[in-house]
Amino acid sequence: MAYIPIRLLRPSKVPDVKGPAIVFPLIGRDQGTMLVTGGEMPHVCFLEGTYVGEGFEQAKAGRWEGLALEHIEIEVDQTAQFRPALIRQPLGSIIRTGSSLEVIISIKDGHGFDTAARIPIEGTAAEERELEVGFTKWRAVINEAAERRVIFTYTSEKTADM
């Protein structure tokens, strides 16, 4: 991973992070790197570790903490496209529609069962019938002046039913 200017990182409790953001684990924590979404109801998605692809509402993050890097941008590998469907969705993958950017995560439904959900990274959920494309490979970057830094690279390897 590239060096990150220290002024861009801040130790933070996950419920206090403003998405879209990447949260790196603190030394001694076994949580893995996380994506925090923005939007009306922010969520957390694990990008590494035991819970990769799983997530929950940011408000339920409790005492989770880490080094937050806010205001990230997402870049995708256009050769890693897929057509979003209703089953076997790649967890942690990015969906781009005409009006939104979403991530697919596995969350617990109201009955405690795992289900795949499309969570807006910014803004609101896509309107039905919009054209859309998914990407299984993406990276989080920050742009500063004339310099772009790759912060985290993700490849979806786990799928879930939707």
Image (cartoon, helix red, strand yellow):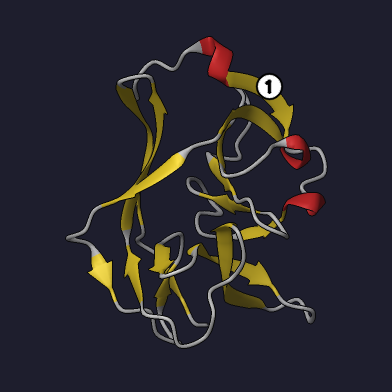
Q: Quadrant of residue 111?
A: bottom right
* Residue density around tag 1, few if under 14, some if 14–19, many if 20 or more, within 10 Å: some
| Element type at mark 1 | strand
| Along the line of sight, the residue nearer the viewer: 89 or 39 | 39
At 72% from the left and 77% from the top, the residue drawn is 109
In the displayed structure, would residue 71 be above or below residue 131?
Answer: above
Mark 1: which amino acid? Pro
Residue 6 in the image: state x and y as whole percent: 53, 11
Q: Is residue 81 left or right of residue 65?
A: left
* Residue found farthest to the left: 79
Q: Which residue is at 25% across, 67% downward?
A: 81
| Residue at x-position 59% and y-position 71% | 125
28 lies left or right of 75: right
User: Where in the figure is residue 62, as x and y percent of width and height?
Assistant: 82, 44
Counting labels gives 1
- At 65% from the left and 56% from the top, the residue drawn is 39
> Is 127 on the left-hand or right-hand side of 10?
left
Decide which of 24, 141 is in the foreground and name it. 141
Residue position marked by numbered label 1 in the rendering: 11
Residue 66 x/y as whole percent = 65, 29
Quarter holding the N terminus?
top left
